[in-house]
Image (cartoon, grey):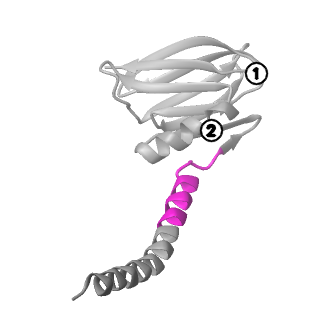
């Protein structure tokens, strides 16, 4: 086989590869994009409050962290070593004791949109309780990190 014939064969192979690889690449890109969009948990509405909870797996963590800017309260649940924990029950009450949110079995990441004001966050995880008084502003995010044994 001459050098000229080898170049022609290589060229034909590359053309064939290109015609089958590009559509496959486009399909993979669409599937990855669709997965990223579905990685965000559905928002839950309770009265004046909207929240999302999750953070299971890298895709969901990334999607939730990207959505965090839309919420003014961010609660992170982790153990003493920094590993995320889940199965936390939350109750958030407004000043005066009015319950504004009750969520069971929340994930390691919990984001809520609350009206601006003072709140008490009570959390329960495997028999351990935590209670924190927080102030939530209309803009910005109040971060609460709960550490569990």
The x, y position of residue 79, in whole percent, is 34, 23
Residue lying at 38% horizontally and 31% vertically, measured from the top left: 84
Q: Is residue 39 rendered magenta in the image?
A: yes
Q: Is residue 14 rendered magenta in the image?
A: no
Secondary element at tag 2: helix
6 relative position to 40: left or right: left
Q: Which residue is mark 1?
A: 139
Q: Which residues are magenta?
A: 28-43
Circle 1 crowding by C-alpha within 10 Å: few under 14, some 14–19, many from 20: few
Q: Nearer the viewer, residue 110 or 61?
A: 61
Tell me: residue 47, above or below residue 25. above
Say the numbered circle drawn on residue 78: none
Secondary element at tag 1: loop
Residue lying at 64% horizontally and 37% vertically, measured from the top left: 51
Q: Nearer the viewer, residue 85 or 100?
A: 85
The x, y position of residue 112, in whole percent, is 65, 32
Nearest to N terminus: mark 2 or mark 1: 2
Circle 2 crowding by C-alpha within 10 Å: few under 14, some 14–19, many from 20: few
Query: Where, by quadrant of the figure, is residue 85 drawn?
Result: top left
The x, y position of residue 70, in whole percent, is 69, 34
- C-alpha gap between disc 2 and disc 1: 15 Å
Q: Nearer the viewer, residue 4 or 62?
A: 4
């Amino acid at each position: 086989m001459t050098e000229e014939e080898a170049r022609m064969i290589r060229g034909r192979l590359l053309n064939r590869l290109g015609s089958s690889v590009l559509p496959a690449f486009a399909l993979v890109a669409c599937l990855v994009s669709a997965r990223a969009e579905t990685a965000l948990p559905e928002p839950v509405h309770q009265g004046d409050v909207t929240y999302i909870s999750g953070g299971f797996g890298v895709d969901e963590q990334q999607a939730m962290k990207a959505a965090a800017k839309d919420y003014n309260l961010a609660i992170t649940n982790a153990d003493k070593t920094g590993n995320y924990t889940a199965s936390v029950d939350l109750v958030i009450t407004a000043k005066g004791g009015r319950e504004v949110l009750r969520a069971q079995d929340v994930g390691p990441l919990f984001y809520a949109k609350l009206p601006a004001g003072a709140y008490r966050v009570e959390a329960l995880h495997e028999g351990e309780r935590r209670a924190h008084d927080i102030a939530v502003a209309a803009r910005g995010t109040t971060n609460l990190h709960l550490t569990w044994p």
